[in-house]
Image (cartoon, helix red, strand yellow):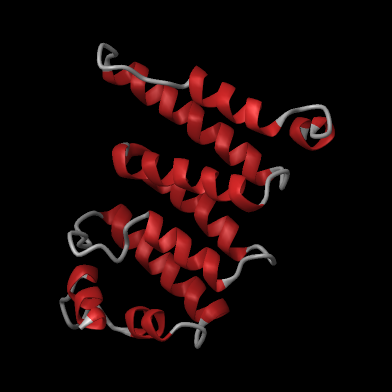
Amino acid sequence: MVLNRMNSSINLDKYLAFMLEETKTNAGMKNPEIHALMMGRMMCVSAMIDSQWVSGKTFYKLLDILAKIYAEQEFLREAIQLICIKVLKSSSANIALFDKIVSDLKMLSEAKALSSSADLSLFLCLRDIYLTKFQGQSKEHDKLMCTDIISNKKNLASIAQQIRL
């Protein structure tokens, strides 16, 4: 609400730089400090996305920040998943945004397997959104999202590799 009301008075680039500086970590920090800073960073990014204040390149920068947190902080994966799902369920979401989120979260990476409950949960949520909103807009995603990975005992990496071949 504050961001929505004050958006004409706030320089977006300076705000983003300030947020990143205030939540910066260093090698000498203990895990609880790092976790608190990363949670704060995630919450700031989430607030910026929820405010619908940002668009274009800055919006994609925010998604990049979330993807980096997702990769490095396992305890925040479910919260980031909820943010991404909320973004993809918005009326302005399109297949390019879906591709960006799938790519950023490395769901198609050859090294990625559904090894954790967070990864499986994310994949199943992305699959549901794809089948509901975007099916038929990408041949690659149609094949990936329609494959029954559970009964075939396959992981995303092997499916993605087959699609590329």
Is 164 on the left-hand or right-hand side of 17? Answer: left
Q: How many numbered discs, if any?
A: 0
**Residue appearing at x 54%, y 34% in the figure:** 43
- Identify which residue, 72 or 100, lies in the foreground: 100
- Identify which residue, 122 or 103, lies in the foreground: 103
Residue 101 pos. (x, y %):
45, 59
Figure quadrant of residue 51: top right
* Quarter placement of the C terminus: bottom left
* Quarter placement of the N terminus: top right
**Residue appearing at x 37%, y 82% in the figure:** 140
Residue 32 pos. (x, y %):
32, 19
1 versus 149 height, above or below: above
Is 45 on the left-hand or right-hand side of 125? Answer: right
Residue 2 pos. (x, y %):
77, 30
Is 14 on the left-hand or right-hand side of 27? Answer: right
**Residue appearing at x 42%, y 73% in the figure:** 127
Figure quadrant of residue 150: bottom left
Residue 146 pos. (x, y %):
36, 84
**Residue appearing at x 49%, y 35% in the figure:** 42
- Identify which residue, 137 or 89, lies in the foreground: 137
